[in-house]
Image (spheres, rainbow, N blue to C red):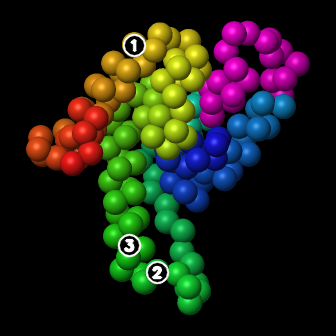
Amino acid sequence: MIYRYVAYRVPEFDAEDLTGEVFVKMVEGLPSYRITEAPFEAWLYRIAAARVADYYRRHKHVTEAKLDDELPQDDPLPEELLLEQQELDGLRAALQQLTGEQQSILIWRFVERKSHEEVAEMLNRSVSAVKTIQHRALTQLAQILGTRKETRHYLRGRHD
C-alpha cells in the first residue's frame, strides 16, 4: 500500500527507494510513537507523504529516465509502453498541481480503495471535509487534464 501510494507521486524508478526510506523512518520513530485514535497506517502514510515532499525538494526540475537494454518477449510493444508512460506522466504532472492533501485523498480513495471514513481518520478530518476536498480535487484535476464537461459524469456518480 505504501509503495503504491509513493509510486503514484514520484517516478517509478525512485518509488522503491522512497518506500524503503519510509520504513527506515518508521523503525527509527517507533520509540516515540504514541497510540492514538488514528490507525498505525495513518502514521505510515504521514511518513510517506513527508518522504515524497523531501524527494521533490531534493529533485527540483531534475528529470531522469530508466533505460532497459533488453525487452522480454511477453512485454507490450514499445509504442504501447510509450503511450502508457506518457499517460501516466500526464496524470502524475496533473496530480502534482493539486495540493498534497488533495493528492493523498485521491490516491487513498481511488488507488488504495479506502472509504471516506478511513481517509477522514487518517487525516484527522470529518468525512464531509474529505468528500468536499475530494470533489474539488476531481473538478480541478478534470480542468487540468482538459476533460470536457460532458465526460465528467464520474463527478456526479453516474456510469454512462
Quadrant of the snapshot with the N terminus: top right
Residue sitting at the far right:
31
10 Å crowding of disc 3: few (<14), some (14-19), many (20+): few
Q: Secondary structure at mark 1?
A: helix
Q: What residue type is disc 1 on?
A: Ser
Q: Where is residue 48, by image quadrant?
A: top right
Marks 3/1 in contact by CB < 8 Å: the verdict is: no
Q: Where is residue 139, by image quadrant?
A: top left
C-alpha span from label 1 to label 2:
42 Å
10 Å crowding of disc 2: few (<14), some (14-19), many (20+): few
Q: Secondary structure at mark 3?
A: helix
Q: How many numbered marks have been drawn onto this rendered protein structure?
A: 3
On whether residue 29 falls in the magenta region, the answer is yes
Say whether disc 3 or disc 2 marks the residue closer to the N-terminus: 2
Q: Nearer the viewer, residue 18 or 130?
A: 130
- Provide the residue designation for mark 3: 82
Q: Which residues are magenta?
A: 28-48
Say whether disc 1 or disc 2 marks the residue closer to the N-terminus: 2
Q: Residue at x 57, y 43 (%)?
A: 6
- Provide the residue designation for mark 1: 128
